[in-house]
Image (spheres, rainbow, N blue to C red):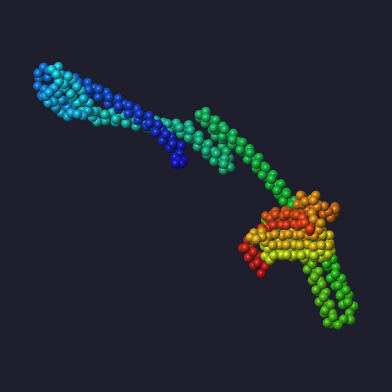
Amino acid sequence: MHASWLGLRGRIVLALSIAFVASHALLATVAVRLTDRMLERERRRSASATLSVLATAIDEGASADVLLREATSSGALRGIELRWPGVEAHTHGRIGMGAVVRVPLRTGGSLHGWTEPPGAEVTRPLADLLLLYFAVTGSAVIVLGFVALTVLVVRPIERATRAADRLASGRRHEPLPERGARETVALSRAFNAMAEQLRADRQALEARVAELERTTAELRAAREQVLRSERLASVGRLAAGVAHEIGNPLAAILGLVELVREGGLSEAERAEFLGRIQRETERIQKTIRGLLDFARRGQGSSAATPRSTSDLSRIVEEAARLLAPQKDLRGVTLERRLAEHAHVRGDPDALAQLVLNLLLNAADAVRGRGHILVEVEPDERGDWIRLAVTDSGPGIAPEVMGSLFEPFVTTKPPGEGTGLGLAVCHTIVERHGGRISARNVPGSGACFEVWLPAAGPEARTSDANDQK
Ligand code: ADP
């Protein structure tokens, strides 16, 4: 049985009691036995003397009957038997129990006497005396032993335990007093040394943690900086397409304004021209707003833990819309296979950046002519959402295959590529608890595959409510 409920003091009392009882029980038994034996011997000796006197008297012709009765009634012997050969034995008192003493008669025959067994009246006082002695000495030994062990062993252990508890809970260590028995002093010294060492280690650790926190903060700031620059780079690239996109409606507006100014139009024509001017202006406004939205997005929020949910399919649609005006995408077919309700838990702005980076890279790879396939679909169990961008370009160059997601890895000529796009993608995916990989598809170009954790059903519901 596990007896940890019994403290050190309890155990000491128990051990002392057991040791005391074990050693003194033996002593008591030996004392009682020896006393018994001595009494027995004494009784035999006096019985044999009594019987010798009786035998002499009987041999000299005294009446055996009277003598024997007197002897038994006086208590000297318990029972006496006089045996003569050929004659029935004379018996007095109780015979057959206890020790027997035999004395021969000179005239033939013999006297047999039985002594009294040792009575309680003899052994009882001795037992009481022994008990008293044991009680007194036992209590004294237990109390003294208890006090000595408490002072010498238990107290120092308790002090050390309290100090260890204080240390463990991070409170200030108060040195243990270095006094008492040699071993106690050694224990206190060792403990104090350990506490001092721990204090130094803790200080060093705290300094390291503070330094690490500073470095982490700096790294986070640097990462945010990279994300921001990447976003601005994308905006710059998109701006070219946007400029082209708004060029046509602007030209149309200018022409229409010219016609209206020249006059000579019927009221109906004027109204129609003004309507067209309004529609073209709205188109320009929409295009510019799309770009501005993207540029403004995520300012100050990109470091936040992704908490909201976003429909990845919708994000792909938006990115495709932003990309559509790009000049170098005119000869490219952008195929979309987008599952409905592909909800992921994450920051929509960062995810938009991720999709845009992959699409821009694919656009670069196909060099204005080819095919880009974007797929968004949940896995079989609905735990993950897969985003894949496959292009018909030349595939990933072998020299960058192993380090694609590291920053500043690029095969593009200076001024064209920064080598940060995929590193940013990797950071975004990692922050969302997902994974990203790249491979070359035989007979086609590169395929970039991203797995993101799907948002739970409750997130989807709340998202659906938001959209209503
Ligand atoms: P950058 O586009 O500025 O070079 P990225 O990190 O986006 O930086 O890309 C790093 C490199 O990965 C590119 O220079 C290119 O060699 C390779 N890469 C990226 N996407 C593709 C792709 N779709 N097909 C082939 N190679 C690619």
Q: Left or right of 441: which side holds 247? A: right
Which quadrant would the C terminus be assigned to in this image?
A: bottom right
Where residue 201 appears, as percent x and y from the top left, is 63, 39
Residue at image point 67% right, 55% down: 433
Q: Position of residue 268 (x, y in %)?
A: 83, 82
From this view, report whether residue 100 is shown above or below residue 235.
above
Please state the horizontal and vertical placement of residue 411, each as a whole percent of the image.
82, 52
Q: Quadrant of the N terminus?
A: top left
**Which residue is pictured at 63% across the width and 37% down the height?**
200
Name the foreground residue: 11 vs 436: 436
- Whether residue 119 is situated above or below residue 393 in the rendered picture: above
Q: Is residue 265 above or below residue 131?
A: below
Q: Is residue 303 visible?
A: no
- Left or right: residue 96 versus residue 410 is left
Residue located farthest toward the front when viewing the structure as drawn: 86
Residue at 79% over, 69% down: 285
Image-quadrant location for residue 80: top left
Residue 439 appears in view: yes
The residue closer to the viewer here, 225 or 336, is 336
